[in-house]
Image (tube, helix red, strand yellow):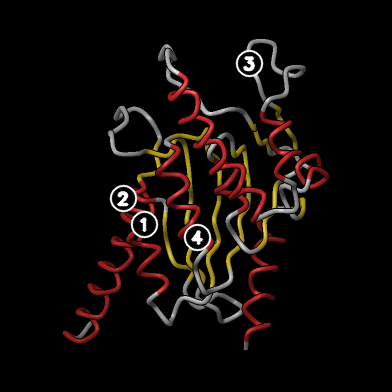
């Protein structure tokens, strides 16, 4: 093997190692020049959405301080033509989750989301932030009031603060899906489903019937839809 071929092989190996490292560390990769000749960036939102405080090293987490710069880079990269968001999250930090959701919603390229195991709590606005959303038949979404982490609420101002946070979530979700604000709020404060809590759990087709998610489907349908959306722009 000549020096040129050896250098090319070494460079290729380094690129592959960087891609593997990025996928392992951040849950992200670019599906370069797929069979449909489109560059699609893959973003996975897995585990808990981490905010300003670091979670335990044993916890699976999506770090918003990694995701936000990447989304800005994607918006500024003319070669990336679409974004596919894979979700399997228990929720997490409200401000961090809404920040990621607002960034996804403001991208100029076509975006598709796919809810896999579940997309609960702040995962709900993340799931609906894309242009089109899918959920697998067994996927779940839990809608519940904002958690208070065991704090004792002692003032009316504190109640008003949490109402304001809930309004931000309800407003975002109702703007980016087919469900109305009041209907979503009633699901959030449902007392009949969860014996020790408020809220509602929806599975698969139920999320579509409620107007949260656009369609039941898997990775095949999600990628096919994204390619079609990109083709529609050309």
Q: Position of residue 89 (x, y in %)?
A: 52, 38
Could you give the CA–CA distance between mark 2 and mark 3, rounded to whole angstroms? 31 Å
Q: Secondary structure at mark 1?
A: helix
Looking at the image, which residue sits at the far front? 156
Task: Say if mark 2 contacts mark 3, CB within 8 Å.
Answer: no
Mark number, residue 206 = none
Could you give the CA–CA distance between mark 2 and mark 1, rounded to whole angstroms? 6 Å
Could you give the CA–CA distance between mark 3 and mark 4, rounded to whole angstroms? 30 Å
Q: Is residue 142 left or right of residue 39?
A: right
Q: Position of residue 26 (x, y in %)?
A: 36, 51
Q: Is residue 143 left or right of residue 183?
A: left
Q: Secondary structure at mark 2?
A: helix
Q: Which residue is mark 1?
A: 68
| N-terminal-most mark, 4 or 2 | 2
Mark 2 crowd level (few <14, some 14–19, many ≥20, 10 Å Cα): few
Q: Which residue is mark 4?
A: 104
For residue 72, what is the image quadrant?
Answer: bottom left
Q: Nearer the viewer, residue 16 or 206?
A: 206
Task: Say if mark 2 contacts mark 1, CB within 8 Å.
Answer: yes
In the figure, 140 relative to 27: above or below? Answer: above
Q: Which residue is mark 2?
A: 65
Could you give the CA–CA distance between mark 4 and mark 2, rounded to whole angstroms? 14 Å
Q: Position of residue 151 (x, y in %)?
A: 40, 15
Could you give the CA–CA distance between mark 3 and mark 1, rounded to whole angstroms? 32 Å
| N-terminal-most mark, 3 or 4 | 4
Mark number, residue 197 = 3
């Amino acid at each position: 093997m000549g020096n040129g071929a050896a250098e090319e092989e070494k460079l290729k190996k380094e690129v592959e190692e960087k891609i593997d490292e990025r996928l392992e560390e951040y849950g992200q990769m670019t599906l370069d020049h797929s069979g449909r000749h489109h560059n699609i960036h893959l973003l996975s939102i897995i585990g808990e959405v981490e905010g300003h405080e670091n979670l335990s090293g044993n916890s699976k987490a999506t770090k918003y301080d990694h995701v936000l710069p990447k989304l800005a880079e994607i918006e500024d990269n003319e070669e990336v033509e679409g974004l596919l968001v894979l979700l399997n999250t228990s929720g997490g930090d409200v401000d961090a989750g809404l920040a990621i959701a607002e960034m996804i919603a403001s991208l100029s390229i076509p975006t598709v989301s796919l809810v896999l195991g579940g997309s609960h709590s702040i995962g709900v606005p993340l799931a609906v932030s894309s242009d089109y959303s899918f959920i697998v038949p067994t996927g779940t979404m839990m809608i519940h009031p904002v958690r208070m982490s065991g704090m004792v609420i002692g003032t009316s101002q504190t109640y008003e603060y949490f109402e304001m946070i809930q309004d931000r979530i309800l407003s975002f979700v109702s703007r980016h899906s087919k469900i109305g604000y009041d209907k979503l709020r009633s699901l959030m404060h449902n007392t009949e489903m969860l014996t020790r809590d408020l809220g509602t759990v929806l599975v698969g087709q139920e999320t579509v019937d409620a107007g949260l998610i656009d369609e039941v489907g898997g990775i095949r349908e999600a990628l096919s839809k994204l390619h079609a959306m990109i083709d529609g722009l050309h």
